[in-house]
Image (cartoon, rainbow, N blue to C red):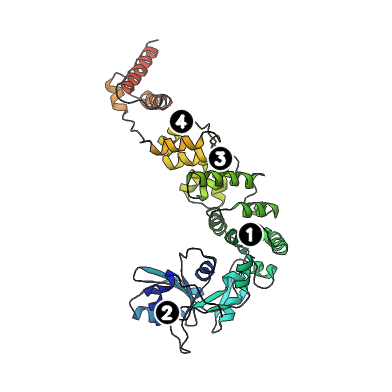
Amino acid sequence: MMKLPNLSWWKSPALHKIVEALIDDRSEHARVVGGAVRNSLLGIDVSDIDLATRLRPEIVIEKLTAIGAKTIPTGIAHGTITAIIDGEKFEITTLRRDVSTDGRHATISFSDEWQDDATRRDFTINALYADVKTGQIYDYFGGIDDLNRRNLIFIGDANERIKEDYLRILRYFRFLILMDNVETDAATLAACAHGAPNLRSISRERISDEFQKILSKENIVISISAMQNAQIFDHFMPEIIPDAAEKIADLIKREKKLGISPKWQRRLAAILPHDPKLTYKIAARLKMSKKNMLLMAILSDRQEINDINVRKLAFEHGLENATDIALLYGHDDDYAAIISDIQKWEIPYFSLNGSQLIDAGIEKGPKVSALVKQIKNKWMDCGFPAGQSFDELVNQMISETKEFDKN
């Protein structure tokens, strides 16, 4: 009998309070399920703890309220509530079985059997349950062996699992990264390719959310390459560039060299054409927020990377975005030095306004705002001079404007 490793999250007093409260009439505690068990066995940090229980949602709420936990009905129609106690958050779901599926949604019924719940999960490595009291792991489909072999396998027939929810195609490529295995199962990949046209029936929000999770992982080259080979992108983002895997590999190398964390927007910009308008449309099609749509347009606008340009980018779009653009488009021999320099730079304040130009004799009207903009651009092109040098630049451009107006 395999037991859960003795990890810090397992000792959480809050977790044990929850489990003690959820003893059902068979005297069996709720079990931790899915990612927390999987990651513990892989030696990966656990960030979220999900539990499964035989108890119906209303009984879960009643029992947890009695011990002072806050309960939120985050997915109560499907048996899920979120519990917060002692500042810790847990997601608790009643055991379920699928009644019907249509590739997008499932109709479920509650169950008393652990294996019913395990059967409706996607991969063998996600159908692992652990008893918090004893540490015993319950493995219904050989998930532990698959973890040890770093194999990502659907439960049962891959085609049938995918038909239940076509988003599982993208989940496959996300968990493929976790397994850190350069080999992909040919039959599973073929099932993903076969089901991929049906991704068009999935909401753009779900597609976008899942793909963002892929892009946020550490080493995503294997998944981007496998997705291209199986023509997965054709059905939700056909604009991806042909050498996307190579571009991602290069970007990851740069990120690691400078100790910069993965960022999905930066990585998405790396695999799309350098066309701000097109990228904005793609982001809109994937139902991204307005903020991310604008950010994608900024990051896809290829720039000549040098000290002055990067400082201009930092002034206009912020240090973080300037760093991202330098990572994406900087030359191999100097991008690191440019990024190091820009991260130490304090963005200056442009103090000139229209009133000052009017006081200096510029006639009121559209000409004032146009001149402010011209001076600002000249100031940036000259390297952001300050003090007397800034005053001289302003006075020179005011004089040139007055002279032009006379003629």
Q: Is mark 1 on a helix, strand or loop?
A: loop
Q: Is mark 3 on a helix, strand or loop?
A: helix
Q: What is the three-letter code of the residue carrying label 3?
A: Lys
In terms of depth relative to the viewer, which is nearer, 330 or 61? 330
Q: In this view, does 345 lie above or below 104?
A: above
Asked if disc 1 and disc 2 are in contact, CB closer than 8 Å, the reply is: no
Q: Where is residue 99 in the image (x, y as percent from the top left)?
A: 61, 77
How far apart in space, not on screen, are marks 1 and 3 (Cα)? 37 Å
Q: Single out the mark in the foreground, 1 or 2.
A: 1
Other-residue count near label 3 (Cα within 10 Å), few / some / many at <14 / 14–19 / ≥20: some
Q: In this view, does 151 lie to the left or right of 88?
A: right
Camera-near label (3 vs 2) is 2
Local packing at callout 1 (Cα closer than 10 Å; few below 14, some 14-19, many 20+) is few
Residue 32 position within the rendered picture, expressed as x and y whole percent measured from the top left: 49, 75
Marks 1, 3: nearer the viewer: 1
The amino acid pointed to by label 4 is Asp
Q: Name the residue under label 2.
A: 19
Q: How far apart are marks 2 and 4 (CA)?
A: 57 Å
Q: Which residue is drawn at 60% across and 44% down?
A: 247
CA–CA distance in space, label 3 to label 2:
52 Å
In percent of the image, x 57 and y 70: which residue is there? 126
The disc placed on residue 277 is 3
For mark 1, what is the residue? 181
Please, what is the three-letter code of the amino acid marked with disc 1? Asn
Kindly check if marks 1 and 3 are in contact, taking CB atoms under 8 A apart as contact.
no
Q: Earlier in the sequence, mark 1 or mark 4?
A: 1
How many badges with numbers are in the image?
4
Q: How crowded is mark 4: few (under 14 residues within 10 Å), some or many (20 or more)?
A: some
Q: Secondary structure beneath disc 4?
A: helix
> Which image quarter: residue 23?
bottom left
Q: Are marks 2 and 4 in contact (CB under 8 Å)?
A: no
Q: Please report whichever mark, 1 or 2, sits nearer to the chain's N-terminal start.
A: 2
